[in-house]
Image (cartoon, rainbow, N blue to C red):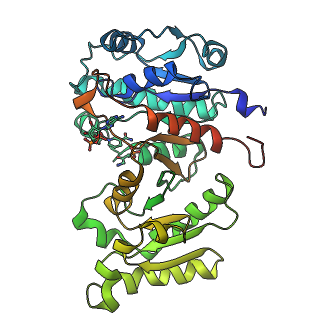
Amino acid sequence: MTQTESLPLALSQGDPAGVGPDIALSAWLERTVHDLPPFLFIGDPAVLAVRARQLDIDVPLKETDAAGAVSVFSDALPVLPVPTGVDVVAGSPHVSTAKSTIAAIEKAVQLCFDGKVRGMVTNPIAKAVLYEAGFGFPGHTEFLAHLASRATGQSFRPVMMLAGAKLKAVPVTIHIPIKDVPAALTETLILDTCRITARDLKERFGLSSPRLAVAGLNPHAGEGGAIGLEDEEIIHPAIMQLREEGIDAFGPLPADTMFHDEARRRYDVAICMYHDQALIPVKALGFDDSVNVTLGLPFVRTSPDHGTAFGIAGTGIARHDSLVAALKLASEISRPAGAAS
Ligand SMILES: NC(=O)C1=CN([C@@H]2O[C@H](COP(=O)(O)OP(=O)(O)OC[C@H]3O[C@@H](n4cnc5c(N)ncnc54)[C@H](O)[C@@H]3O)[C@@H](O)[C@H]2O)C=CC1
Ligand SMILES: NCC(=O)COP(=O)(O)O
């Protein structure tokens, strides 16, 4: 076991009124079945205790710091307390919890930089709740890059990748209105996204020469310019440049025919032009096994692919499969290259 492998993962609470607490509790209960790496929950122990009672499950909690988490994990769910300071009702999000939701994420990042955890996994946040509290970032992805820059003085370009057993996909533009996508799509943005994806698939995922299938923006990838010009004028030149750099990128491909079974065998990752072009196929093919992973950061971050699911928080029907997959993936990609599994 390497030094990194002896460390826990940090798991941030996410929105306390969402399913984050439910799935953290139930994943811990099945830690042995799933052979989970030890994780430290960063959030409010009172929220966990109330949710466990509501779900009628028995989960011992133990408040600790990162150093104590691994030894605690087999007998209790280790919790680094970040109190919400309010009574949280499952399924009823409230802006008053935003401060602690953000504090838990910041704490997890700090532990990564302090070398106290091997990486971080984030439970889902409700973006609208955080925006109401003045949060100035579209989501975790951009916030984590900001925190990394603040900690190091360097700039980081985060890349969102959804990774499942059947498909990995990267949206080049992320949380922006669909009407703004064409203007946001530049050759530089596509190049940066593909370079970071290719590098991290090599360095973290062990693919020696990742194949990047690049989607077009318009129907039929523009049909030779008759149905839009971005495919020929922006995406195609970016692909040519990537190929000159030795990156195995090809396209632009008509997006409607690049996700069927046979097409997916020709590539390792689909580079998509906007959020739903990437996330719809990933979630359709594997809602329960897919994981959101942020590439381009100086630490490991994964997350379940789903959101806060307020409608089912506290009911006992939230599945923890995607969180389990996120914990396992974080553990795998935080292992130094070449280390045996
Ligand atoms: N990484 C993150 O922080 C993410 C946060 N979100 C946020 O979540 C909120 C709700 O988003 P929605 O679009 O409603 O997506 P959602 O993923 O929360 O829910 C979509 C559907 O899937 C079901 N579902 C979700 N997770 C489930 C689970 N673990 N087990 C069983 N069923 C599950 C829900 O009940 C609902 O029917 C939004 O505020 C959004 O911003 C959404 C995606 C990722
Ligand atoms: N749809 C994916 C999503 O919303 C996750 O965003 P982030 O919080 O991981 O940036």
Coordinates of residue 332 in the picture (x, y in percent): 64, 42
Q: Is 42 on the left-hand or right-hand side of 130?
A: right
Coordinates of residue 76 in the picture (x, y in percent): 55, 11
Look at the picture and state if 44 lies above or below 14.
above
Quarter of the image that includes the C terminus: top right
Q: Residue at x 48, y 22 (%)?
A: 42
Q: Is 58 on the left-hand or right-hand side of 268?
A: left
Foreground residue, 32 or 239? 32
Count every numbered label the image shows and give the total.
Answer: 0
Foreground residue, 175 or 143? 175
Q: Is 137 on the left-hand or right-hand side of 29?
A: left
Q: Residue lying farthest front?
A: 262
Look at the picture and state if 236 lies above or below 188.
below
Quarter of the picture for ligand 1? top left
Look at the picture and state if 172 lies above or below 253.
above
Foreground residue, 144 or 338? 338
Quarter of the image that includes the N terminus: top right
Q: Quadrant of residue 281?
A: bottom left
Q: Quadrant of residue 18?
A: top left
Coordinates of residue 67 in the picture (x, y in percent): 66, 18
Q: Quadrant of residue 96?
A: top left
